[in-house]
Image (cartoon, coloured by chain):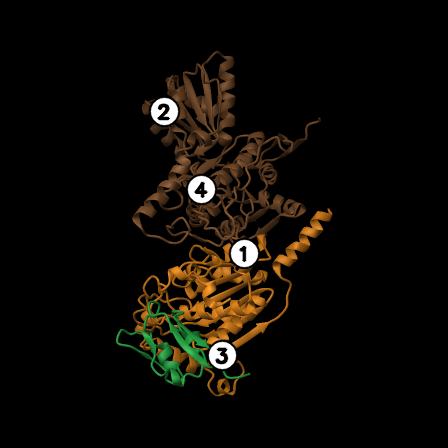
Chain colours: A orange, B green, C brown
Amino acid sequence: MAVKDYIRERFFPHLWCPGCGHGIVLNGLLRAIEKLGLSKNEIVMVTGIGCSARIAGYVDFHTLHTIHGRALAFATGVKLSRPELKVIVPMGDGDALAIGGNHFIHAARRNIDMTAIVMNNRIYGMTGGQFSPLSGCGVIATTSPYANIDNDFDVVELSKAAGATFVARTTTYHVKEISDFIRKAILHEGFSVVEILTQCPTYFGRKNKEGEAADMLRRYKEITTPIGSDAKKENPDLIERGIFLQKENPEYCSEYNAIIQQAMKG
Amino acid sequence: MAKPKLKQHLIKRSWCKGCGICVEFCPKHVLELDALDKAIAARPEDCICCRLCELRCPDLAIEIETE
Amino acid sequence: MSQNIKFIQGNEVCAEAAIYAGLDFYAGYPITPSSEIAEHLAYRLPQIGGKFIQMEDEIASLCAIIGASLTGHKVMTATSGPGFSLMQEALGYAIMAEIPCVIVDVQRGGPSTGIPTHGSQGDVNQARWGTHGDHSIVALTASNHQDLFEMTVYAFNLAETYRTPVILLLDELVGHMRERLIMPEKGEIPLVERLRTSVREGVDYHPYLPREDGRLPMSDFGGVHRYNVTGLYHDMWGFPSSEPRTVHGLIRHLVDKLENRIGEIAKFREYHLEDADVVLISYGCSARSALHVVKNRRLRGERLGLLELQTLWPFASEIVREKCAGARSVVVVEMNMGQMLQAVKTAVDEPEKVFLANRIDGVFITPTDISNILRLIQGKGV
């Protein structure tokens, strides 16, 4: 099947702003699914609220557009009740880690088999450009007009510590990594996190003088480096990209099935 | 494997929002924005079918068709 | 055939009745006085191949059962006031997205932490209006174990019939009380199963287009129909819409599908109402004391009757008005500051004849409490 066979074409052009990185994430996600050759009937996409969450409307899967921050909780019910389904949960940075932070760490802790994609544009776009828990110090936003003093999370470290068993990070400049990492995350049996730095030219770019979409994309090339590169040793401020963790641990739904076997024996 | 040969750039004009990402990162400077800020293949003969424009397009508006 | 008689706790009755009704997915978070429901189901569900999950909080619990309902399962969660407060946003989602699910609230004292281990009926109006926006809701209750069993099954039946969340509003007293239950035989109480669409693969399926009878056939996630579910106003395919006619039609549908069927949904019990000049109206644990008063006074020749509400919402105002028409006075017996009293006052022809007999100190309202208030109303002094 071609990429266009996975989308609901009647809703295009989509509602995202010109140059928004979320479209690039959608693009890469579709290519990952195309490569895996999955049936559309076996995929459930669950999203929360925000610009990121609108991705659910555009894909021709079973789509569940829920409430702010709780996508992973809904997804947990979908997955545990029908473990044979592939569950993909794209979330924004505020959605996943502010209001949804508790669900994020607990879904990771259970190691329930689903793919969490953090579309990290470091800002609340839908509500007009407020800072998020991934903005970081110094960022200018409508609610940090003098510069943000809130520290940010490191999504990779947080996911690892919480119990995720597949953790990767890339950017919207590195499009081949997007589809590669998402494909591997979907194949991984356990809780997978793929953080994708994605540009918001409308709010983050303008407020922080990072230029237009293409300038922001070029910046992703400049401020990131593959895991373990020599460049990182010379410049510790570089953000590492790649697959940070991929390990096998008991998966929640499989473990629960064992409980059922035990209980049924009586 | 033989190098893919370009048939055409399929660009959905109604989907393109003119962000310029495809123009900026085309390694062979094949693409341009027209007067209406829509992507066009100005120099298709230079295209090496790397598909980076297709992969990076946030609007899913570009498809590289090969022979 | 010999009867299967159990002497068990109310919360266990609720859990067993849920299994009888077909429950096979439960998500919850521990909270007094509802935890025994979760404990019982953690043990029982895997025995029948069902699933139990303890979530990180109450809103996650309701979200999880909504997800599981969409894959075709009968689902439930249970909590108490503070957890019910936390669930309200997800409750609105279940109403908007028309997801069958059952939410048990074993009421305790409030607001806030209140008295976890003492009873109250303070969540009656929260059940009605706790989540934001215009909507209708079904809330059921019970005063004894036999009724509790039936009402729990009824909650699942209504959830499936009307594609709606149903709240089972219990209280600490009924939840923790132990009394006799005659376990209904299989098939004794009719069950409503999920209405699934007959639309074939490849044919346009409208998950949000009601049939003429108001019901909306569903398609399980993972099946052949891929559609969208959202908390936004949406069209008949489930896709977001802000088109005024669509929005108006949706809200009207969500309200009308329940409010227009009060006659079918409303359940109540009546005791000696035929010639009553004093009508007590009560529900849940309070109805036990109210019934005691009615029976005692009847022995003394006084014409007291009781209307026990089992469906609290949608409120059966026509039934209440009719049952109270011949009464000199109407006394609402409840363990709150008069939450059902207000609904009764708006229903009856003479609101000035409606009085409140209540207790709000965490102590079970006794027949003596009610008798004292009756004497005050009748001008006889305590």
Same chain for mark 2 and mark 4? The answer is yes
**Residue carrying label 4:** C110
Secondary structure found at label 4 = loop
What is the CA distance from the residue labelled 4 to the residue labelled 3? 50 Å
**Proximity of marks 1 and 3: CB atoms separated by less than 8 Å:** no
Relative to residue B4, is residue A54 depicted above or below? Answer: above
Q: Which residue type carries mark 1?
A: Thr
What is the CA distance from the residue labelled 2 to the residue labelled 1? 48 Å
Q: Along the horizontal axis of the image, is C23 left or right of C95?
A: right
Which mark is drawn over residue A76? 1
What is the CA distance from the residue labelled 2 to the residue labelled 4? 25 Å
Q: Residue furthest top?
A: C301
Q: Which residue type carries mark 4?
A: Gly
**Residue carrying label 3:** A240
Same chain for mark 1 and mark 3? The answer is yes
Q: Closer to the observer: label 4 or label 3?
A: 3
Q: Position of residue C352 (x, y in %)?
A: 32, 24
Q: Which residue type carries mark 3?
A: Glu
User: Numbered disc 1: what chain?
Assistant: A
Secondary structure found at label 2 = strand
What is the CA distance from the residue labelled 3 to the residue labelled 2? 71 Å
**Proximity of marks 4 and 3: CB atoms separated by less than 8 Å:** no
Q: Position of residue C256 (x, y in %)?
A: 38, 37
Q: Which residue type carries mark 2?
A: Val
Which mark is drawn over residue C354? 2
Towards the viewer: C153 or C364: C153
Towards the viewer: C59 or C97: C97
Precedes in sequence: disc 2 or disc 4: 4
